[in-house]
Image: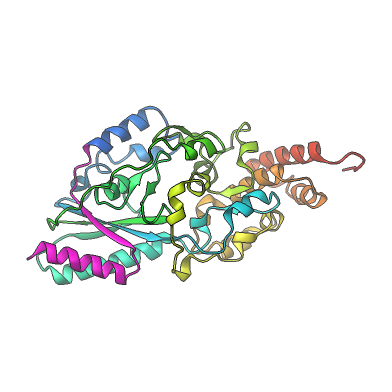
Amino acid sequence: MDTRQLADKIRHWGRELGFQQIGFTDIDLATAEQHLHDWLDRGYHAGMDWMTHHGHKRSRPAELEPGTLSVISARMDYLPPGTEPWQRLEEGHKAYISRYALGRDYHKLVRKRLARLAELIRAEAAEAGLARALVDSAPVMEKPLAQKAGLGWQGKHTVLINREAGSWFFLGEIYTDIQLPVDEPASEHCGSCSACMEICPTGAIVGPWELDAGKCISYLTIEHKGSIPEELRPLMGNRVFGCDDCQLICPWNRYADFTGEADFAPRHELDDARLVDLFRWDEATFDERTRGSPIRRAGYEGWLRNLAVALGNAPWSAEIEAALNERAHHPSELVREHVHWALAQQHARRPAGISG
């Protein structure tokens, strides 16, 4: 088998399947493994205890999938056109949802495409005993692998950046036992820029390439299941699911392309929704409107918690106070706590002469 010809075919198939770039690398992640251990030792993973599980499977691909010799790394653009992120962040009465979460859950779409690519590889190379598609479905160090495969470098905010495409893209991998020719690793091009560190609302980027997840709005609104620290709540603004500030400010994103994938287009007008309207969803509406959406990961209680914080940060309005009062006796202690905090913020902002 001519592995260079196979690599060319894989790139061609990848483009046909909607990926913007395919790269190849070996499985040596020794440097990334040490960085991961240092990060965990500092406690920067916050409540994501699953990051400490699986032994070395995350940083040693052949321990996750015995026989792995090469990793195929793929990226797919996801930024929907016309979603006006900066404008939404300035409209305090509207919800800001991370651009990746406005449409269909990427896990399903990207995994399906990668699975099809794996099928094509197995059909072309009969000797391939392994071609497993992975999209956040197993312990994988996707960003270090993508950097080694030439897809981009990890910026100071730790997000992968591509010189020609910015950072608005998803990653996925195929582990294979075929020894494929490796690509040149991407070099780092952040230079002296610190825009992402300076704009982070909560100061979660504590140093270049050092992210404290416990302060990160994406972690707090998605992965974190408990109470959001009070000192961080005012800093969250209207961000109710994820945060894109570090990507929005990155100068390399001037080169980013909009996605052509219809499934990544906003659903239920989530790119222009009022906080009050989302807060009034009952659980059945939440379940129906987040079916097949990344937002479901937060859960209904987490959704209400996040929205309550955003409503507390919003400009005062009688409608917001009324909506919060409607949930002041919610059966969830977590929701009640954040609603009462939000009401206190709204009361403090209420114009003189207006009674509650």
Is 59 displayed left or right of 43 in the figure? left
Pick the quarter of the image with the N terminus. bottom left
Which residue: 39% across, 65% down? 109
Outermost residue on the top side: it is 42
Magenta residues, start to end: 1-30
Outermost residue on the left side: it is 1
Q: Quadrant of residue 349?
A: top right
Which residue: 22% across, 47% down? 61
Front in this rendered view, residue 193 or 33: 193
Which residue: 51% across, 49% down? 248
- Residue 204 in the magenta stretch? The answer is no
Pick the quarter of the image with the C terminus. top right
- Residue 28 in the magenta stretch? The answer is yes
**Rendering coords of residue 40 (x, y %):** 36, 32
Front in this rendered view, residue 330 or 288: 288
**Rendering coords of residue 29 (x, y %):** 23, 41
**Rendering coords of residue 200 (x, y %):** 53, 38
Is 70 displayed left or right of 171 in the figure? left
Q: Quadrant of residue 131?
A: bottom left
Front in this rendered view, residue 42 or 253: 253
Which residue: 66% across, 57% down? 278
Up-down: is 320 above or below 20?
A: above
**Rendering coords of residue 300 (x, y %):** 59, 53
